Each structure stands twice: as structure tokens, then as C-alpha cells.
Image (cartoon, rainbow, N blue to C red):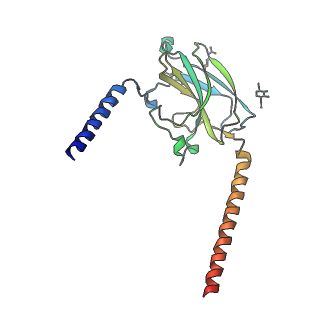
Amino acid sequence: MVSASAASVSVCLILLLLGSLMGPVMAEVYFSSLPRNLIVSASPKPGQVLEAGVDNITITWGLNQTLPPNTAAAYKNVKVRLCYAPNSQADRGWRKTTDDLKKDKTCQFGITQQPYSEVNSTFVYGVERSIPSATYFIRVYAVDSSGAVVAYGQTTDAKKKADLFDVVGITGRHASLDVAAACFSAFSVFSLVFFLVLERKKTKK
Ligand SMILES: *[C@@H]1O[C@H](CO)[C@@H](O)[C@H](O)[C@H]1NC(C)=O
Ligand SMILES: *[C@@H]1O[C@H](CO)[C@@H](O)[C@H](O)[C@H]1NC(C)=O
Ligand SMILES: *[C@@H]1O[C@H](CO)[C@@H](O)[C@H](O)[C@H]1NC(C)=O
């Protein structure tokens, strides 16, 4: 007994030690700590509905010109991402926003990654067929030479309410009908069984 608890204590200590050693290596970046230094715009009008696999989005980004140019001295690359708006995240843990960017599920879809440029950059993104039906915005992360995110910009406001657009996914165009059909057939099997059981009970009595 004594040796077992001693063993578990030492396992705990080893885990703690490992944790503290790994801490600085896996430095966490919190979204709330990032400056919004990039200005990002995209072609969809607020509320516009785009079709996955069909429509294109033109995205433009650059440093906020009122900031001193050396603000961007450490910017090496940019990552442009497609992000879920809050109304498409509700009750969906797998899309949840977390301040720790390693755990954040808001911006799951990569659009492009390219070297940071001092002049405004533009990219035309063909909405991929795999993009699910949802409401979105676009965010651009500036990344330093170590790969750490150091700044951002996005097409919506801080509350992620303004300038959102919708994508209708490939499956979304037919899925709701399929789901309804599946529900109905499941329900009819269930009611058949239910009535058979009921009938049996009646005849037994
Ligand atoms: C999207 O861009 C592609 C490639 O440039 C083009 O062929 C296509 O017609 C565009 N789609 C729309 C809806 O503008
Ligand atoms: C650009 O930066 C200035 C100064 O920080 C700020 O007041 C302004 O709101 C920014 N512009 C945009 C569009 O974010
Ligand atoms: C870059 O984009 C910003 C915001 O859209 C605009 O104010 C600025 O004039 C642009 N700069 C250049 C060099 O085009």
C-alpha cells in the first residue's frame, strides 16, 4: 500500500516536471493578446450566400496604414483562414472558440499561406466543395519566423456580428431533405414495432 502511493506520488512528480519542461516549448498564444494590425476585406456583401464548389471570394489584406511600418518588422508569413461565425458555433463543441489558439476551432479552413508583403495583397479563393453550410468571416494571421502568430485582421468586427456571409455546402443543398426522409422512415419502423407489441399485449389479455 505504502509503496503504491509512493509510486503514484513519484509519477505525479515526474508528470509535473515534464509539464514544466515542456511549458516554454509549447508557448501558448492567446487570441485576446493579439493586436488587430491588419485590415482585411473580402468580396462577399453582408449576408450574401455563396455556393461551395462554385463561387469565389476575393480577399485583400495589408497593414493598417496609420501604424508605423516597423510594426510589421517581425511578420514573416500570413495565414488566411475561413472562420465560423458565432451563430454557426452554438451547440457545436467541435467549432468552439477558445482563446488559446492551439485549441481554437473557429478558423478551421485554410485559404492560403504566403509571405507577408508590405503592400496590400489579394487572393482569389474558390470556395472548396468540402466547406459545410454555415455563416462565415475571414481572418488573416501574421506569423513570425518561429511560426508564432503575432497579429491578425478580420473581415468582421470584434463581436463577429458585422459583414458575415453564408456558404451553402454541396450536401447542404439536398441534406435537409435526406434527413427528413431518414427521420420519417425511422419513425415508421418504430411505430410499426410499437403497434405490433401493442397488438400482442391485447391478444394475450
Ligand atoms: C471562380 O474562379 C474560377 C477560376 O478563376 C472561374 O473559372 C469561375 O468561373 C469563377 N466562378 C465564379 C462564380 O465567378
Ligand atoms: C488603424 O489603426 C488605428 C490606430 O491604432 C485605429 O484607430 C484604427 O481603428 C485602425 N483602423 C482599422 C480599420 O482597424
Ligand atoms: C491598402 O488597403 C487599405 C485598406 O483597404 C487602403 O486604405 C490602402 O490605401 C491600401 N494601400 C494601397 C497601397 O493600396
Q: How far across and how far down the image is residue 165, in percent?
A: 65, 37
Q: Foreground: 190 or 10?
A: 10
Residue drawn at (72%, 58%) of the image:
181
Residue drawn at (69%, 54%) of the image:
179
Q: Foreground: 92 or 32?
A: 92
Q: Quadrant of residue 53?
A: top right
Q: Foreground: 30 or 46?
A: 30
Residue drawn at (47%, 22%) of the image:
148
Residue drawn at (47%, 24%) of the image:
35
Instruction: Spot the residue most to the bottom.
Output: 205
Q: How far across and how far down the image is residue 162, in percent?
A: 59, 37
Q: Foreground: 112 or 160?
A: 112
Q: Quadrant of residue 125?
A: top right
Q: Quadrant of residue 139?
A: top right
Q: How far across and how far down the image is residue 104, in percent?
A: 49, 35
The quadrant where ligand 3 appears is top right
19, above or below 74, in the image? below
118, above or below 24, in the image? above
Placement of the C terminus among the 4 image quadrants:
bottom right
Count of labels shown?
0
Residue 12 in the figure: left or right of residue 192? left
